[in-house]
Amino acid sequence: MGRILLVGRLALRDLQRRRTEAALLLIAILAATTTLTLGLVLRDAASDPYQSTRAATNGPDAVADFSSAGLDRLEKLVSAAGVTDHSGPYPVTAAKLQTSGTTSDVQAVGRDAASVSVDQPKVIEGSWVSDGGVVLEAAFANAIGVRVGDTLTLEGRSFTVVGEAVTAAMAPYPGSSCLVEPGCLHGAVTDDTVPAGVLRNPGLVWLTQADVRSLTSDPASLSYVLNLKLADPARAQTFVDTNTAQPFVDPDQGDGGRPLTIQSWPEILNEATELARDSQILLLIGAWLLGLLAVASLSVLVGGRMADQTRRVGLLKAVGATPSLVAAVLLAEYLLVAVVAAAAGLAIGALSAPLLTESSSGLVGSAGTPSLTWSTVALVTAVALAVAVLATAVPAVRGARTSTVSALADAARPPRRTGWLIALSTRLPVPLLLALQVAARRPRRVVLGVVSIAVTVSGIYVLLVLNTFLGTRPGGYTEAQVEVLRHVLGVWTVILLSLAAVNAIVITWATVLDNRHASALARALGATPQEVTVALAAAQVLPALIGAVLGVFPGGFGLFAAIMAITGGDGDRATLPSLWQLLAVVLATVLAVTALTAVPARLGGRRPVTETLQAELA
Amino acid sequence: MSLNGRRIDDICEKALARLRRTAVGFVFQAFHLMEELTAVENVELAALLAGRSPRAARRRAEELLEQVGLTDRARFLPSALSGGQRQRVAIARALSNEPLVVLADEPTGNLDSAATMEVLQLFKDLHESGQTLVVVTHDARIAATADRMFSMRDGALVDETRLTGGSTGRLGALVGLED
């Protein structure tokens, strides 16, 4: 017990002593865990809720819809091989829904008040259909802001909203299937592109059959929908392929009615989860990028502390600590930060995920509250702990191996010599001469700085492409969906830029600390504080420039190509950033890094020379 | 406080920096060489900071290293040099911009007897060639090698002694490092 107390106390005290470093470490791990959580939560949101909805509503394995002229073929389909149960056919009609301030096209399905064995929509609020009462599909109700008890009109006739329900027979709004003639248009559409009578992004409502029939004066204009249960749901697509190729489909029907269409449940699943899946892909790619940035941050932070830790190990050993106790102390410190970062990342990720899963709010279990699963919690925690263990491993092993005397005597890691950079520096003005010598002292840190900026700029490049792509309102996406994807990109941008900013500051500060002696000496030899300040800043800005250029090409191009390969997207449809945009990104990056490094560099350039040089003697 | 007739205790940082480049050379007890730069690169650094061309700076550095007897160590890193050699590099660096005065703060404090002798001999040679040296030391034997000795106590000058080259005899015998 005493040992545990000692380990905890030592870890806490060291964290308290180095609050800024601990905070930066926390931010770096937190950014990665938050994005990872968002990606994983969305992955779950993209598949589980549909399955839950299918189970809760006894969802159909295939849904057939056809015009009234095809009713005579119904019996044939119901008795087709493999069909074990069905519900319907139910009448469907197109209608114009009006509520306070909102007008929308809808497909109104006539249902019985009694429950059925196939596709009985699950009421999540209020009650099921009754004469004069309308039930709205939950995502549609959410989108138009209608609640149970409100009043609305359908084709001018007043109805009371009696319930909200979810179904697995159709993708949630705005991705609804089209059941009516003469058809529907989804995505962003303008008035002049919509043929007369065609529905625009229709929502789904349920009425009693009598109410649906009362909405139209021409019974022949009604369409019908039939829900089928199959003996083998896994072969639903085969059933669809077989039966749409067979006599049920008659495009040349003399009555001009719409042909029979059948949709399998996997097709509906795809449609229902398309947006969440796209969001998830974007977030997981964002998580990889942030993971890289987090590793860069941690490398700088941990590397900077390595020499310090070695001396600390020497002190602990000198007072009787065993190698295992020393390792435990080092590990405990990072584990504390990692556990806090994992918990905070899980909380932030889970709380912000609903903003990105609106598309699934028409499914059971996902109405704005995508939940954390144990696997997500375990994976995020494992990643955070792995980072902590990796960060601790080297000093712990070194501590265990090093003798007490050597550990106590351990000096700061000597600077490296990069001869060609030093030779090049002699031909440059004083600030650049000093900057290049700063870079030559820690080439690995320069590489980390370049990688960090390159990763950030690659992310920005992809964001620009996707943002332009979303601006063109790509097919299949409605305004609301575009808005959701913009949210995802927004989250990406904020976290990416935050972590890149943290990296820039951390790297500059580590450089300032590392160069205390060299800077003081340069000033003792005649360099001005301004020259040293400019040198410390230039040592970050020059790698940032290289990183920004590499981030555009090949970084941005490569990342975009990778995203297209993963998502199966058509890269040719995307508009790549123009030359001026790329130049602006590079310039903005350099200016941002200059601004971020200005303060630490100025502090470093103005450190008192005498105190710094005397400290070396202490 | 004045240097060459000019008050320097109230001038700005920029002017102080200019002064350090042109008028003052520093020699520290702990040498304070750049560990990643070779001996010749350390010496030319001061000249480069003063705006000399790379070629001129290198030529001057090589001359100075020759003067302090380290031509064969010019491409060595400080970690490969002895204490005395490091201090000689530091002295060469201090002389790089032909300063009016070289300020040496306990220049032999980290050196053994042999290295101390090397440095004092170098100072003597420099002095004889006309270079002004101000050496800070706690060691009365080192102080006795100077022309003028200022004694300080608690940060204030308390005494000035004009020495006429000390007693007769060899330098080493004077400072008690040789028999």
Image (spheres, coloured by chain):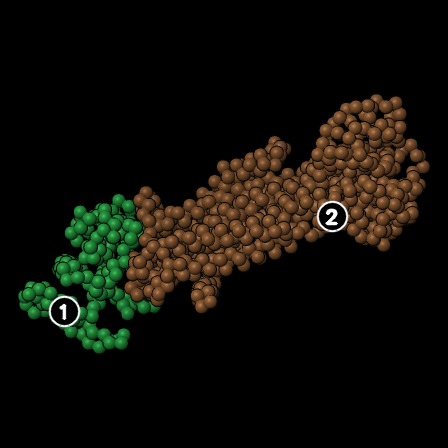
Chain colours: A brown, B green
Counting every numbered tag in the picture gives: 2
Q: Do the residues labelled 1 and 2 touch (CB within 8 Å)?
A: no
Using residue B130 as the reference point, say whether residue A167 is left or right of it: right
User: Can you give x and y, in whole percent of width and height, for residue B62 in the image?
Assistant: 20, 48
Residue at (20, 68) in percent of width and height: B137
Using residue A218 as the reference point, say whether residue A597 is left or right of it: left
User: Can you give x and y, in whole percent of width and height, for residue A449 in the image?
Assistant: 44, 48
Asked if one can make out residue A583 in the rendered structure from this viewpoint, the answer is: no
Using residue A106 as the reference point, say whether residue A273 is left or right of it: left
Mark 1 highlights which residue? Answer: B141
Asked if one can make out residue B79 in the rendered structure from this viewpoint, the answer is: yes
Which amino acid type corresponds to the residue marked 1 in the rendered image?
Arg
Tag 2 subunit:
A
Q: If the image is split into quadrants, where does the C terminus of chain A sit?
A: bottom left
Using residue A518 as the reference point, say whether residue A58 is left or right of it: right
Residue at (50, 44) in percent of width and height: A455
User: Can you give x and y, in whole percent of width and height, for residue A419 in the image?
Assistant: 31, 44
Camera-nearest residue between A323 and B174: A323
Mark 2 highlights which residue? Answer: A364
Tag 1 subunit:
B
Q: Of helix, strand and loop, which one carries label 2?
A: loop
Decide: is A610 above or below A110.
Answer: below
Decide: is A177 above or below B165.
Answer: above
Camera-nearest residue between A157 and B150: A157
Q: Of helix, strand and loop, which one carries label 1?
A: helix
- Please give the label number shown on residue A527: none
Which amino acid type corresponds to the residue marked 2 in the rendered image?
Val
Residue at (25, 61) in percent of width and height: B30
User: Can you give x and y, in whole percent of width and height, for residue A587 in the image?
Assistant: 51, 45
